[in-house]
Image (cartoon, helix red, strand yellow):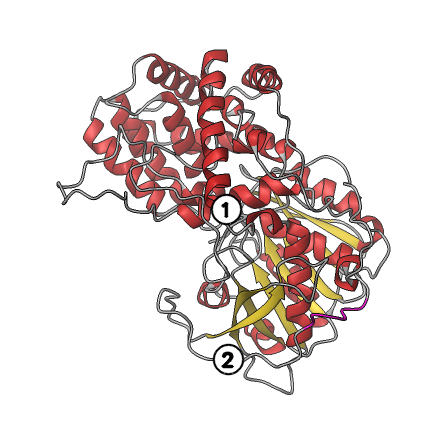
Amino acid sequence: MLTVVAGLVGALLAAPAASAGARAGTDVRAGTPTAAPDWGACPDDVVTTVPLECATVPVPLDHDAPEGEQIDVMISRLASTQPERRRGVLLLNPGGPGGSGLAQPADLAQRGIPDTVLDAYDLIGMDPRGVGHSSPVSCGFTADQDYRGNIPPYAPDDAAVTAQARAAKQIADQCAAHDTDGRMRHMTTGNTARDVDLIRAVLGEEKLSFYGASYGTALGAAYASLFPERSDRVVLDSNLGATSLDYDAQRRFGLGMEDRFPDFARWAAARHDSYGLGRTPREVRAGYLELAGELDQHPADGLDGAFFRFLMFVQVYTDESFPAAAQLWQALADGDVAAARGQAQETLRSTVPGTPAAVAQVPAAVAEKPAAAPTSDAAAPSPFDNAWSSYLAVTCNDTDWPEDVETYRAAVAADRERYPLYGGASANITPCAFWHDDPVDAPVEFTTEGPENVLVLQNLRDPGTPHLGGRLTREAFGDRARLVSVDAGGHGVYVYGPNHCALNTTTRFLVDGDLPRRDMFCRP
């Protein structure tokens, strides 16, 4: 499905004008690719039932040196088959950061994006710089490395924050050691937005429409702010509330879980005779906190309270995951560790692509051990290496994260009280506190100057990107934007969610340019 997560308070510092016109959002001069894309077959690992074409576009590694080193960015295309109705290109981003988007045009088509949109646009997917088939970066994560993923573990006390700090520093050091070509420091949301504008140019388009989900809203907001007159129709779905995913954004996972969990609690209470999780939503919430606390003290064969909380956070992203969440909980409550382990592995196989949770793994203490293999001096690479590495590079490079461990101890303690369900995880320390590279970019500042062409979509109860993110984005864009608030839970609105009001409103905007006259509220 889609992507990351969360929200951030306030507008950020503007990117300074530079020698490269692309940096300032004016005219793209030196370094602009002029040849049309050489469309051909997509890589074998881009598996879709809807045929796509792929091509590579060279972009500057450093947009301040547009004639310097170039890197390849791969894009995909689902072309309109109705030239008389075609109005341009709609570039897509599923989130992350670090999420591959080559298959997204096919994914949206399979999920039922209206034919009027498919007729009006060539849908353009991309692997952003450093991701997948676009000059990928690596921190050298290995399959046997005990790293759970990009969301830090829940910390029940100060000692757990201190332990996580040691682990986070090791990861930051590891990433620096493997970045031998120095490319990782140039992975920023601003640079990716500049890549997008070069893609627009090489496609021969005067303007570019954009659909971004989760972290993709940060990229879309950055593009619409750096290049307002080149942005056509911009849809931002499930918003961070900023042009980056920083520490404030990560901390909002705790708020999102508090907003969303009551939906699951009501569902589970109505099915108490089947799952036994509580007869009322209040009992379900109390049971969650009790079981998590017990697992903090007495892990079930390696499955601890932090991992249980993480799995529950993952499983409330969609209503369809509620039964799996109930099964996991029931298995743990019954002491059936084998069933819980299997449910955990299945959960991580089916998480929402593009979100931080989509690139997590079962802890080493919980995972089933593979059959013995021939020994080797080199450990096998983790299948999540690039996803983890690119996520860290973008989030750590985009903004300055707090570096004092005590700051995180205080934040975790505060958020455990304020957001008991998950605040002790979302406030915890990450490798960004110890990142070796200083930002090469100031965070992109929202601009209110430009066309009224931004549609902001936001569910009221989204665990990864709370409704506050939509409100912040709407406020930051001023009269350029309209907010569509949807009375729904879960992550994703347009096509990824079932609300007909939001679907119709967004389709009218994309096809006919009908931006609502004022902010809207869509009933369930």
Question: Is residue 333 visible to us here?
Answer: yes
- Mark in the foreground, 1 or 2: 1
Which residue is found at the position 55% from the left and 44% from the top? 393
Spatial distance from mark 1 to mark 2, Cα to Cα?
A: 31 Å
Mark 2: few/some/many CA within 10 Å (<14, 14-19, 20+): some
Q: Where's residue 446, x and y in %?
A: 78, 48
* Residue type at numbered disc 2: Trp
Residue 265 in percent (x, y) is at 44, 29
One can see residue 460 in this view: no
Q: Nearer the viewer, residue 227 or 145?
A: 145
Report helix, strand or loop for mark 1: loop
The residue at 50%/29% (across/down) is 262
Q: Is residue 29 magenta?
A: yes
> Residue 101 location, x and y as percent?
50, 60
Q: Residue type at mark 1?
A: Asp
Instruction: Tell me which numbered mark, 1 or 2, is placed earlier along the sequence.
Output: 2
Q: Which structural element holds mark 2?
A: loop
358 to 228, vertically: above or below? above
| Residue 452's disc number | none
Question: What residue appears at the point 60 percent right and 32 percent down from the top-left corner?
Answer: 252
**Which residue is found at the position 71% from the left and 57% from the top?**
223
Q: Which mark is residue 179?
A: 1
Please name the residue that numbered disc 2 is placed on: 39
Q: Residue pushed farthest bottom?
A: 84
